[in-house]
Amino acid sequence: MICVPSVFVAEDAYAGGVLSYVKDFVVADERFPALSVDVTEIDEFEQFPAISAGDIDATMEVWPSGHAQDYADYIDASNGVVDGGQLGREALG
């Protein structure tokens, strides 16, 4: 039996376009030939506890203005969630 490593990515109501691009990029990337990307539909407020618990590995889009308490509880408090930085135009400078 072959074990294929998986990455579990959150998809909230706003992240569909970004998530599709990232999933296609990761799956097509020759550096990760055996990586499986599984998408989990989840409410945007539930993604922080799910990442902290290890049920989800990443989320592609979070609006910090609506999640100040989640940032404080999970990122600032080093409670199992890391801010990976900007996406899109903001990441390009």
Image: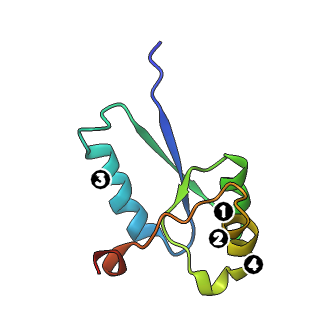
Q: Mark 3 falls on what kind of element?
A: helix
- Image quarter hosting the C terminus: bottom left
Cα distance in 3D space between marks 3 and 4: 31 Å
Q: Amino acid at mark 4?
A: Gln
From the image, tell me which residue sits under label 2.
44
Q: Residues within 10 Å of mark 4 (few under 14, many from 20)?
A: few
Q: Residue at x 48, y 70 (%)?
A: 15
First-in-chain label (4 vs 1): 1
User: In front: 37, or 90?
Assistant: 90
19 vs 58, left or right, is left
Residue under label 4: 69
Asked if disc 3 and disc 4 are in contact, CB closer than 8 Å, the reply is no
Where residue 50 sits, quadrant-wise, is bottom right
| Crowd rating for badge 3 (residues with CA inside 10 Å; few <14, some 14–19, many 20+) | few
Q: Are marks 2 and 1 in contact (CB under 8 Å)?
A: yes
Residue 77 spot, x, y in % from top left: 73, 65
Specify the label residue 47 is tagged with: 1
